[in-house]
Image (cartoon, grey):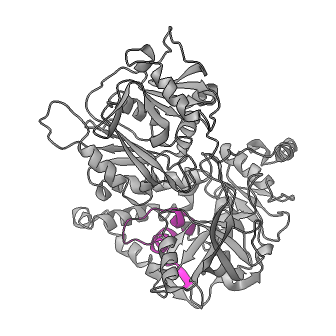
Amino acid sequence: MKHRSTRDTVHDLRDGGYLIEVSDPVDPHLEMAEIQRRVYAGGGPAVLFTNPIGTSFPMVSNLFGSIEQARYLFRETLESVRRLIEVKLDPSAVPKRPLRYAGVPLTALRMLPKFTRRGAVCGGRCQVTDLPMLTSWPDDGGAFVTLPQVLSSDPDDPQNLMKVNLGMYRVQLSGNEYASDETGLHYQIHRGIGVHHKRALARSQPLDVTITVGGSPAMTLAAVMPLPEGLTELTFAGALAGRRIGMVRGDHAPVYGDADFAIVGSVDPNVTKPEGPFGDHLGYYSLRHPFPVLKVRHVWHRKDAIWPFTVVGRPPQEDTTFGQLIHELTDPIIPTVIHGVKAVHAVDAAGVHPLLLAIGSERYMPYLEEKAPQELLTQANAILGNGQLSLAKYLMIADDPDDRLDLHNIEEFLCYVLSRFDPSRDLHFQTQTTIDTLDYSGEGFNRGSKVVIAAAGPVRRELPTELPGELELPEGFKSPRVVMPGVLAVEANAYRHDDGRSDLGRFCEAFSAADSIAKFPLITIVDDSDFASRNLSNWLWNTFTRSNPATDISGIESDTVAKHWGCRGSVVIDARFKPWQAPGLIEDTETIKKVDARAARGGALAKYL
């Protein structure tokens, strides 16, 4: 294995039966993205485009098209990396299980990054305008790099490879106000490059940054991997790649020597330009905002370079596989990171960060007869203070003393929580806080709220599965639909600036806790109840990407006591689209026809289109 380039990866996937080649011309503007979305949805393999329009570089998508394909790519190193992470978090595990961890020292030796004088990436030079100009959605602000590896060095210690930050931050290549030697650099809140940027600002000096594309797929995964303290992205990549990562030294940020492409430059601390819009993983466009600009000094590429790309949009997409791999590597070690927490799961169908599920443990005062969330709340606070988990907007956490829950069975977990939580006691809000940069449900850019919903103890209620026969809704509300046991979706008129917020209060005030509708512990107000109830994925996406807990949660017979909000009847979430929220992603109709015609012509690709 030990891929050194994207071409190595392509050859490996071809040998394993995980590759389709397309030799006729394909347009990187919208057409490739439409093909990629369909291939991924159809469970297809990687796709190599050997004749893309507008560039001399071949392009490949869907390298991580399924969890099986990803495991194939890392088949020689995945288990050793898992064991390395276990030892990093708990060194005392080694003497307890010496045979399991016998190979860890060798893994540790090959994980340390190293400087090299040159790398294969330095084999050729080109301009930014020569690179593939991939546009994924009709209203994207320009072409973007969708699998970038953004490397920055610490301005206080620039020669220390152990302080290099590697992240996957959005890179805009064209459009807006960028010159031909500039790219946009969008990084979100709680990202490591921000620490380096702040130190550069304090020194009033540019921040050296290198954007690499391709090379070993280990670098791609490392760029998105949430790692334990003391394990850097480059060391993780080395362990996953099976060899030390070579970095080219020079008067620039370190350059990944085995990459297919490298865009080398620096960020002026005093300059920002508009970046976006861009179709993002919540299923909406992230809008234009000022972000840093990379001033490009030069662009390097391998002589046999291939440009890897993906498409970002409403889940599931190819980046869903990243989440699955991350869960496989980190699920067993969560209890060592956050004591008392048995498992966490960021729900892909809800856009990842909007909804986080967790299993905790109640160990406080076991002699008490009434089981109320206590230690769960401590664990919830620890989760919300931990790295990227802190971006969670809704956190549902449950005690599971019998170890019966599977977090990946989302309906089962939701039923467990909804049948046990007390809505007058078990909702805990954080208002005026930070949320995901890409989430526009809150009061402003990066601004919103969070809620913890905790559940412990025995079943409090049976969850209804049918509509009450005598149900009458207030004016403006209609078409109630049962989504799953205990969850009701009710359609309402479109949200308007002048009276949209009052709709939620008017709905709740129309009922009492004794009414039959209140047997449903959770009601969501939606624009289209048929869409929201069609499947669980639709409801998850609709509910948790379009609501801000502090402003969009109310309840039947609600009250605030000692600054704690609760309700005696149903919790009600207004999950309608709000006028200030970003528009959803819709495919281009002409491109759809174009790809439909390609499917009609037949060939290996056709069955996935």
Q: Nearer the viewer, residue 161 or 152?
A: 152
Q: Is residue 244 magenta?
A: yes
- Chain part drawn in magenta: 219-247
Q: Is residue 513 above or below residue 246?
A: above
Task: Count how many numbered circles sit on residues in the image.
Answer: 0
Tell which residue pokes out farthest to the front in this image.
Answer: 498
Check the image and name the residue furthest to the top: 470
Q: Foreground residue, 339 or 325?
A: 339
**Image point 30% across, 53% down: which residue?**
335
* Residue 106 drawn at (x, y percent): 39, 75
Q: Is residue 255 above or below residue 456?
A: below
Instruction: State left or right for residue 343 relative to residue 314.
Output: left
Q: Is residue 524 left or right of residue 563?
A: right
The structure residue drawn at horizontal position 50% and vertical position 46%, both measured from the top left corner, is 354
Q: Quadrant of the C terminus?
A: top right
Residue 527: name its quadrant. top right
Q: Is residue 156 above or below residue 188?
A: below
Quadrant in the rendering for residue 125? bottom right
Q: Is residue 79 magenta?
A: no
Residue drawn where x is 65% and y is 81% of the image: 264
Q: Position of residue 520 (x, y in %)?
A: 43, 22
